[in-house]
Image: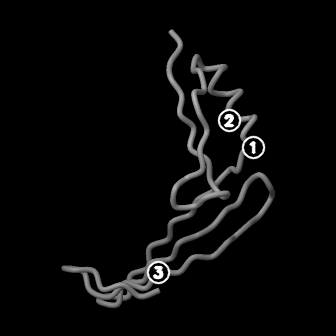
């Protein structure tokens, strides 16, 4: 994907998955700046957890789960936890 960034110029953005070892998925964003050829790398790892695991961690840290909903922009793919502190 190529973006025109005001005050910066054209920036090419590339995303590559670098490793999948469930529940972990690692990936790298590469940004290349057309103005000077500079390259910036950003490595990240996401951990995908099951609903029960997230709920158990919230309770263990003093929260009560009031509701769990689908993310409005990704129904069936991401959960939103509504929780409140119990103490």
Judged left or right of residue 55, residue 38 is: left
Q: Nearer the viewer, mark 1 or mark 3?
A: 1
**Residue assigned mark 2:** 54
Q: CA distance from mark 1 to mark 3?
A: 30 Å
Single out the residue that lies furthest toward the top: 87
Residue 8: x %, y % from top left: 24, 80
Q: CA distance from mark 1 to mark 2?
A: 7 Å
Q: Identify the mark at residue 50; answer none if there is no mark.
A: 1
Helix, strand or loop at disc 3? strand
Q: Is residue 14 above or below residue 64?
A: below
Are the residues tagged 1 and 2 within 8 Å (C-beta)? yes
**Residue assigned mark 3:** 13
Quarter of the figure with residue 69: top right
Judged left or right of residue 79, residue 53 is: right
Single out the residue that lies furthest toward the right: 21
The residue at the point 74 percent across, 35 percent down is 53
Mark 2 surroundings within 10 Å by alpha-carbon count, few (fewer than 14), some (14 through 19), many (20 or more) = few
Considering depth in this image, is 15 or 77 the residue closer to the camera? 77
């Amino acid at each position: 994907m190529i973006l025109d960034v005001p005050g910066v110029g054209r920036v090419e953005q590339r995303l590559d998955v670098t490793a999948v070892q469930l529940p972990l998925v690692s990936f790298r964003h590469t940004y290349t700046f057309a103005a000077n050829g500079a390259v910036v790398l950003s490595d990240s790892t996401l951990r995908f957890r099951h609903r029960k695991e997230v709920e158990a961690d919230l309770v263990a840290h003093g929260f009560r789960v009031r509701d769990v909903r689908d993310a409005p922009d990704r129904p069936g793919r991401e959960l939103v936890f509504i929780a409140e502190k119990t103490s």
